[in-house]
Amino acid sequence: MLDAFTKKRIENILDSYMEQKVPKHARDQVKLNYKIRGDSVTLFEERIGGILSMRSFQKTTSNSNCRL
Protein backbone atom coordinates (compact mmCIF):
# COMPACT_ATOMS: atom_id res chain seq x y z
CA MET A 1 0.00 0.00 0.00
CA LEU A 2 1.32 3.43 -0.90
CA ASP A 3 1.61 6.01 1.85
CA ALA A 4 -0.34 9.25 1.38
CA PHE A 5 2.73 11.31 0.40
CA THR A 6 3.84 8.84 -2.28
CA LYS A 7 0.32 8.47 -3.64
CA LYS A 8 -0.09 12.26 -3.92
CA ARG A 9 3.35 12.55 -5.57
CA ILE A 10 2.43 9.89 -8.15
CA GLU A 11 -0.91 11.62 -8.82
CA ASN A 12 0.87 14.95 -9.40
CA ILE A 13 3.46 13.35 -11.71
CA LEU A 14 0.81 11.52 -13.74
CA ASP A 15 -1.51 14.54 -13.93
CA SER A 16 1.36 16.61 -15.32
CA TYR A 17 2.39 13.81 -17.70
CA MET A 18 -1.16 13.43 -19.05
CA GLU A 19 -1.48 17.20 -19.52
CA GLN A 20 1.74 17.29 -21.59
CA LYS A 21 1.24 14.05 -23.51
CA VAL A 22 -2.13 14.71 -25.18
CA PRO A 23 -2.31 17.88 -27.32
CA LYS A 24 -5.23 20.20 -26.50
CA HIS A 25 -6.78 19.72 -29.95
CA ALA A 26 -6.92 15.92 -29.43
CA ARG A 27 -8.30 15.79 -25.88
CA ASP A 28 -11.84 15.18 -27.09
CA GLN A 29 -10.56 12.08 -28.95
CA VAL A 30 -7.87 10.71 -26.60
CA LYS A 31 -8.02 10.53 -22.84
CA LEU A 32 -5.28 9.32 -20.51
CA ASN A 33 -6.22 8.16 -17.04
CA TYR A 34 -4.80 6.04 -14.24
CA LYS A 35 -5.84 3.81 -11.36
CA ILE A 36 -3.91 3.23 -8.17
CA ARG A 37 -4.51 -0.09 -6.41
CA GLY A 38 -2.20 -1.08 -3.58
CA ASP A 39 1.37 -0.69 -4.86
CA SER A 40 0.31 -0.81 -8.53
CA VAL A 41 -0.37 2.12 -10.81
CA THR A 42 -2.09 1.46 -14.13
CA LEU A 43 -1.92 4.13 -16.82
CA PHE A 44 -4.46 3.68 -19.59
CA GLU A 45 -5.48 5.42 -22.78
CA GLU A 46 -9.03 5.69 -24.04
CA ARG A 47 -9.90 6.69 -27.59
CA ILE A 48 -13.21 7.38 -29.25
CA GLY A 49 -14.16 4.10 -30.86
CA GLY A 50 -13.34 2.03 -27.79
CA ILE A 51 -9.65 1.21 -28.34
CA LEU A 52 -8.02 0.76 -24.94
CA SER A 53 -4.31 0.51 -24.26
CA MET A 54 -3.00 -0.28 -20.77
CA ARG A 55 0.44 -0.14 -19.23
CA SER A 56 1.07 -1.06 -15.60
CA PHE A 57 3.80 0.42 -13.45
CA GLN A 58 4.85 -1.24 -10.22
CA LYS A 59 6.11 0.73 -7.22
CA THR A 60 9.89 0.62 -7.00
CA THR A 61 11.90 0.58 -3.82
CA SER A 62 13.30 4.01 -4.66
CA ASN A 63 10.91 6.70 -5.93
CA SER A 64 13.77 8.31 -7.86
CA ASN A 65 13.66 5.31 -10.23
CA CYS A 66 10.11 6.15 -11.34
CA ARG A 67 10.24 7.54 -14.87
CA LEU A 68 7.53 8.07 -17.47
Image: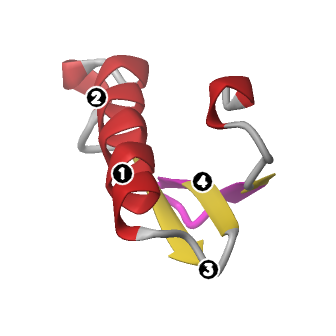
Give the residues drawn in magenta, as a range: 45-55
Residue pointed to by mark 3 = 1
Amino acid type at mark 4: Leu
Residue 38 in the image: state x and y as whole percent.
64, 81
Q: Give the mark, 1 or 2, whose residue is nearer the N terminus.
A: 1
Q: Nearer the viewer, mark 3 or mark 1?
A: 3
Q: Is residue 57 visible?
A: yes
Which image quadrant for residue 18?
A: top left
Residue 19, which numbered label? 2
Residue 48 in the image: state x and y as whole percent.
44, 56
Q: Nearer the viewer, mark 2 or mark 3?
A: 3
* Residue at figure coordinates x 60%, y 53% from the top left: 43
Of 54 and 57, the residue lying toward us: 57
How crowded is the residue under tag 3: few (<14 C-alpha within 10 Å), some, or many (20+)? Answer: few
How crowded is the residue under tag 1: few (<14 C-alpha within 10 Å), some, or many (20+)? Answer: some
Q: Give the mark, 2 or 3, whose residue is nearer the N terminus.
A: 3
Amino acid type at mark 1: Glu
Magenta stretch contains residue 40: no
Amino acid type at mark 3: Met
Residue 11, which numbered label? 1
